[in-house]
Amino acid sequence: MKWLELLFLFIMAFLPALLYVIWIRNTEKINPERWRPIIFCFIWGATIAIIAAIILEFILGFALAVSITDFTNFGFITVVIIAPFAEELIKPLALRTKIVKKELVELEDGLIYGAVAGLGFAATENLLYGYEAYISEGLFYFLILISIRSFGGCLLHASATAWTGYGYGKVVMKHTSIIRILPYFLTAIILHAMYNGFLSVSLYGPVVGLFLALGLTAITITIVRRKIAQLDNENIV
């Protein structure tokens, strides 16, 4: 593969996610987040979170494989349970770093930083899946895949991780037990699992499953942005 082709794949994978970062960040009109922690969160998702999630998914998948004898549902369990758990555990850890944690001063901040970490993760995931599609299936299939993932994959990762970020932000601001984040973490896992489940198994065929997944994404990201705007408006004195 030539370097111009690699550059093309990189731009197609990362540009939509970066545009969504600006969109999400600018949803907050009062005291918008500084770019330095925003960029850090995106890079965390695109690098550390991807690597850590792959390792964790491998460990959990291996543990499952050696403990079962019937592999009929192994792939389904991996996609709908293991992957959502591992990825939604790792992505929001960006908010626990010093550079981001000190920025959690308003309730909407956790939603924003969680979403940005998710978008970084989605960008690298788009690159990896896109590269595989381009090599094995060609440009046309790559463009179809990246178009779907630029909406579905990006905004699913953003909206799911936003809720864990929101929960963690509340823990930091209200000085409560970290266990209070659990309902938000479970929400993130359920949303992610539903999305993966729609794409993996549909009683009415893959096209219906795709539309269900994209519909879920549209609803969840709309709710997240409305929540950011609502909390932002409450800061008006």
Image (spheres, rainbow, N blue to C red):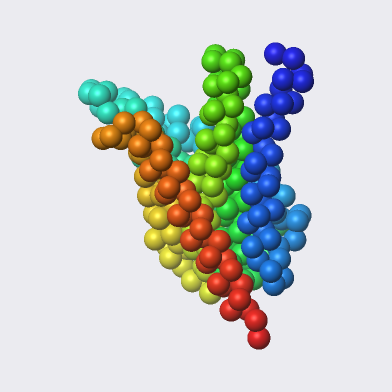
**Which residue, as the protein is rendered here, is positioned at the far left?**
70
104 with respect to 65 (left or right): right
Instruction: Please state, as top left, top right, bottom left or bottom right, where the C terminus lies in the image.
Output: bottom right
Residue 151 falls in image quadrant: top right
Q: Position of residue 10 (x, y in %)?
A: 69, 30
* Residue at point 65%, 41% (across, down): 16
Image quadrant holding the N terminus, namely: top right
Out of 70 and 149, give the one closest to the viewer.
Answer: 149
Q: Residue at x 58, y 39 (%)?
A: 150
Q: Quadrant of residue 58?
A: top left
Q: x, y (%) of residue 40?
A: 70, 49
Instruction: Say which quarter of the image contains residue 78.
Output: top left
Vertical comparison of 19 with 100: above or below: above
Is 228 left, or right, of 82 in this rendering? right
Camera-side residue of 90 and 145: 145
Instruction: Give the residue at x 61% y 76%.
Output: 233
Residue found 60% across the figure and 22% down from its top: 131
Can the viewer see residue 235 in this picture? Answer: yes
Question: How many discs mark residues in the rendered view?
Answer: 0
Q: Is residue 121 above or below residue 34?
A: above
Visible residue check, residue 46: no
Task: Name the side, left or right, on which 62 lies relative to 233.
Answer: left
Query: Percent x, y for residue 79?
Result: 39, 34
Percent from the top left, x then y, of residue 232? 61, 72
